[in-house]
Image (tube, rainbow, N blue to C red):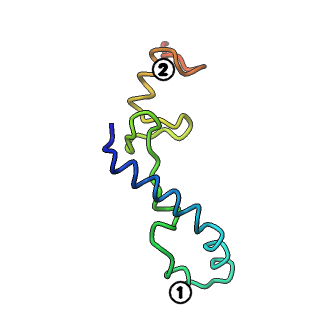
Amino acid sequence: MAKTAWLERDKRKQKTVKKYAAKRAELKAKKDYAGLAQLPRDASPVRQVNRCAVSGRRHGFLRKYGVSRLTFRELALSGMIPGVTKASW
């Protein structure tokens, strides 16, 4: 499980991105890069991190399922993800 501080930091970044989304789009349309530079760094959506919904792990994240590879394997083997079966050939 990821440290709580990291999870809280990511939540704060998500709020900041949402807060400044309209302003960023407006400044980008005007091509006002000086104005964009004045916004907080965390207002950029690039700084958001994909994290596992279960464990909070950021590496090995599977976008389609929203979980890390380790959590995905556990859930798939226990039959919690519909349509996913262990490969055999």
**Residue occupying image coordinates x 41% and y 29%:** 71
Name the image quarter holding residue 64: top right
Label 2, residues with CA under 10 Å away: few <14, some 14-19, many ≥20: some
Q: Please name whichever residue, 70 or 12, is drawn nearer the observer in this view of the structure.
A: 12
Q: Please name whichever residue, 33 or 35, is drawn nearer the observer in this view of the structure.
A: 35
Name the image quarter holding residue 84: top right
* Tag 1: amino acid: Ala
**Residue occupying image coordinates x 39% and y 45%:** 58
Label 1, residues with CA under 10 Å away: few <14, some 14-19, many ≥20: few
Direction from residue 60 to residue 19 in the image, left or right = right
Picture layout, residue 53 above or below residue 40: above
Direction from residue 23 to residue 45 in the image, left or right = left
Q: To which residue does mark 1 refer? A: 34
Residue 51, percent across and down?
44, 44
* Disc 2 secondary structure class: helix
* Tag 2: amino acid: Ala
Q: To which residue does mark 2 refer? A: 76
Picture layout, residue 7 above or below residue 23: above
